[in-house]
C-alpha cells in the first residue's frame, strides 16, 4: 500500500510538471533565422520569422560589442567577466504573459527579450530600442552586484558609449522623445 501511494504521488507530480511546462512554453517555438541560419525560440505568431531574425540581429550586434571590448579593453576585469558570462547561443523571446520586459538568467546564462508591443497588436518593437534594452541586460551580465546599483549604471553607460562608437546602437534621447517598450515607457538613459 505504501509503494502504491508513492507511485500515485510521483505520477501526479510528473503529470503536473508536464502540464505546467507545456502551458508555459507551448506558445513558443523554434524558428530558423534567415540572417544566420540558427534556431531561435520565439512566439508562435505570423511574424515569427521576423522575430527570429530580430533575435539574430541582436545576437550579432551584442557579440560584435563583446568581441570589440575583448580586443580593445581586454584587461578590464568587468570586460573579462562579460566575455566569460555572455552566452550568445541562449537568446530568446519572452512569453506573452511575462510580467517582466526583458531579463538575464544567472547573469548571462540566458537572456530573454520582450520583442513586441503590449498595446499595439503585438507589433515588433524597433530594433534600436530593443538594442538599448539588450545593452541594459548586458550591463547586468558584466556587473557583480544585483539590481540597478551605481556599478550597474556605470557599466551600462560604458557599454552604451562603446556601442555608439562602433555603430552597434544609435543614441536615442528618451527625455525629449520617450519610447514605449513592452508595456513601459523608457524616459531616460545613463547617458543623459
Image: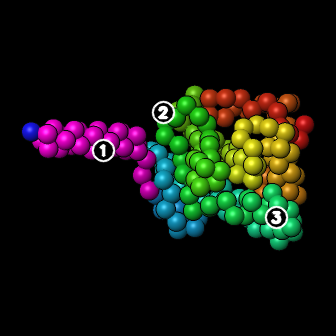
Q: Residue at x 85, y 30 (%)?
A: 175
How far from the left and from the top, in percent, is residue 31?
A: 46, 58
Q: Quadrant of residue 11?
A: top left
**Residue 144 visible, this angle:** yes
Q: Which residues are magenta?
A: 2-30
Label 1 residue SS: helix
Disc on res. 97: 2
For disc 2, the neighbor class at 10 Å (few under 14, some 14 to 19, many from 20) is few
The quadrant the C terminus occupies is top right
Give the residue number, with chain letter if any, for mark 3: 69
CA separation in Å, label 3 and label 2: 35 Å
Q: Is residue 10 magenta?
A: yes
Extreme residue in the left direction? 1
Q: Is residue 137 magenta?
A: no
CA separation in Å, label 2 and label 1: 19 Å
First in sequence: mark 2 vs mark 1: 1
CA separation in Å, label 3 and label 1: 42 Å
159 vs 32: above or below:
above
Give the residue number, with chain letter if any, for mark 1: 18
40 vs 6: above or below:
below
For disc 3, the neighbor class at 10 Å (few under 14, some 14 to 19, many from 20) is many
> 76 or 191: which is nearer to us?
76
Label 3 residue SS: helix
**Residue 131 visible, this angle:** no
First in sequence: mark 3 vs mark 2: 3
How far from the left and from the top, in percent, is residue 70?
A: 80, 68
Q: Quadrant of residue 12?
A: top left
The quadrant the N terminus occupies is top left
Q: Are marks 3 and 2 in contact (CB under 8 Å)?
A: no
First in sequence: mark 3 vs mark 1: 1
Amino acid at each position: 500500500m505504501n509503494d502504491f501511494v508513492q507511485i500515485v504521488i510521483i505520477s501526479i507530480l510528473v503529470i503536473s510538471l508536464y502540464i505546467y511546462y507545456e502551458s508555459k512554453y507551448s506558445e513558443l517555438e523554434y524558428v530558423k533565422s534567415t540572417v544566420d541560419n540558427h534556431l531561435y525560440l520565439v512566439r508562435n505568431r505570423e511574424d515569427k520569422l521576423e522575430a527570429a531574425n530580430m533575435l539574430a540581429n541582436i545576437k550579432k550586434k551584442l557579440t560584435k560589442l563583446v568581441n570589440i571590448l575583448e580586443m580593445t579593453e581586454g584587461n578590464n576585469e568587468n570586460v573579462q567577466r562579460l566575455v566569460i558570462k555572455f552566452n550568445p547561443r541562449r537568446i530568446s523571446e519572452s512569453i506573452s504573459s511575462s510580467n517582466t520586459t526583458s531579463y538575464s538568467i544567472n547573469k548571462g546564462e540566458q537572456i530573454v527579450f520582450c520583442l513586441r508591443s503590449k498595446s499595439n497588436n503585438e507589433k515588433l518593437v524597433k530594433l534600436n530600442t530593443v538594442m538599448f534594452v539588450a545593452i541594459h541586460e548586458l550591463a547586468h551580465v558584466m556587473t557583480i552586484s544585483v539590481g540597478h546599483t551605481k556599478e550597474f549604471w556605470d557599466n551600462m553607460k560604458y557599454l552604451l558609449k562603446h556601442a555608439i562608437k562602433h555603430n552597434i546602437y544609435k543614441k536615442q534621447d528618451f527625455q525629449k522623445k520617450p519610447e514605449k517598450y513592452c508595456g513601459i515607457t523608457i524616459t531616460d538613459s545613463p547617458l543623459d
